[in-house]
Image (spheres, rainbow, N blue to C red):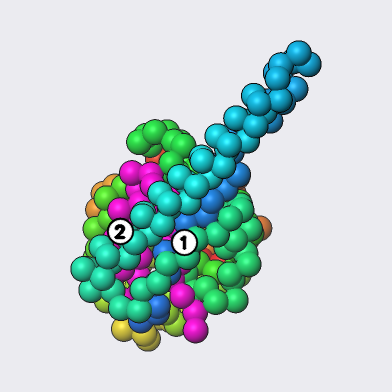
Amino acid sequence: MTNVIACIDGSFLSEYVTDAAVWAANNIESPLTFLHSLEKSMTSNSDLSGSIGLGSREHLLAELTELDEKRAKLALEHGKEMLHKAKAHAEEQGAQNVSIMQRHGDLVDTLISLESSTKLVILGRNGSEHAMSANTIGSHIERAARALHHPILITVGEFKTPSNFMIAYDGREAADNAIARIAQSSLLKGLTCHMVMAGEDTPARKEKFARAQSILEAENFKVNASLIAGDIYPVLTQYRNENNIELMVMGAYAHSKVRQFFVGSNTSKMIIESDIPLLILR
């Protein structure tokens, strides 16, 4: 059975990740697993043996080793406490079939190893090593988006159940795949869809746009479709602000201008500047 995997690390976003996870798991009727990854930086100091000096006594190294062991034990216990707290909160919010998981090692590597049993991953924009700021993103975000093959929901602040979502459409394969994924999934059912296409209003583009709209409407989505002249970034940003969009949905890694908008530095720009959750479809 495939799960919703919610990644928590004790940062201020962990509670918001939990709320988003409950919403998603209930919508798609999947088990919910909270994951805490004990990465090396959390459990050990750097190797100081070379800076102690040849004349120092061996007990200094022994004390450093003991300190690392204590640090690792505390990190383990703290992680378990976070997981149990998240599980209790999720169950209070109505989540069913909730489990917890603690792993040692890199978070993205752990998520890759769990892919066969994963339906959706939820990450906070900022990790525990980042301040509560809209000017940074966690180090795992882009790596996860490139490495994983299932959807990723990124929370950026307090999570509120969305009533609508927006998707950028450019008529290419990735956009069509994203439309198909939305139509086939129960995650976004019941939400108003704002489908926006930026650029030239040509007959061929209008035809593809209308076809994509009809796919969603056939699955009972209410679709507000807008083809707007202009460059992608200002068009999407202005539309999002003017229409009170509550969730941004995008297809990832196609060879198109929309790809350039979301990948690399543009991915970071979008996530950094966004004040709403972001759903990446693979």
Amino acid under disc 1 = Leu
Q: Residue at x 50, y 47 (%)?
A: 73
Q: Residue at x 35, y 70 (%)?
A: 24
Q: Nearer the viewer, residue 24 or 274?
A: 24
Q: Residue at x 42, y 67 (%)?
A: 100
Q: Nearer the viewer, residue 145 or 179?
A: 145
Amino acid under disc 2 = Lys
Q: Quadrant of residue 117?
A: bottom right
- Give residue 168's position: percent from left, percent from top: 45, 59
Question: Which residues, given as a range, are shown in magenta?
Answer: 1-27
Q: Residues within 10 Å of mark 1 (few under 14, many from 20)?
A: many
Q: Is residue 189 visible?
A: no
Q: Nearer the viewer, residue 152 or 228?
A: 152
**Labels in figure, total:** 2
Q: Nearer the viewer, residue 178 or 6?
A: 6
| Disc 2, SS | helix
| Disc 2: which residue | 85
Horizontal side of 144 relative to 255 (left or right) equals left
The quadrant the C terminus occupies is bottom right
| Disc 1: which residue | 35
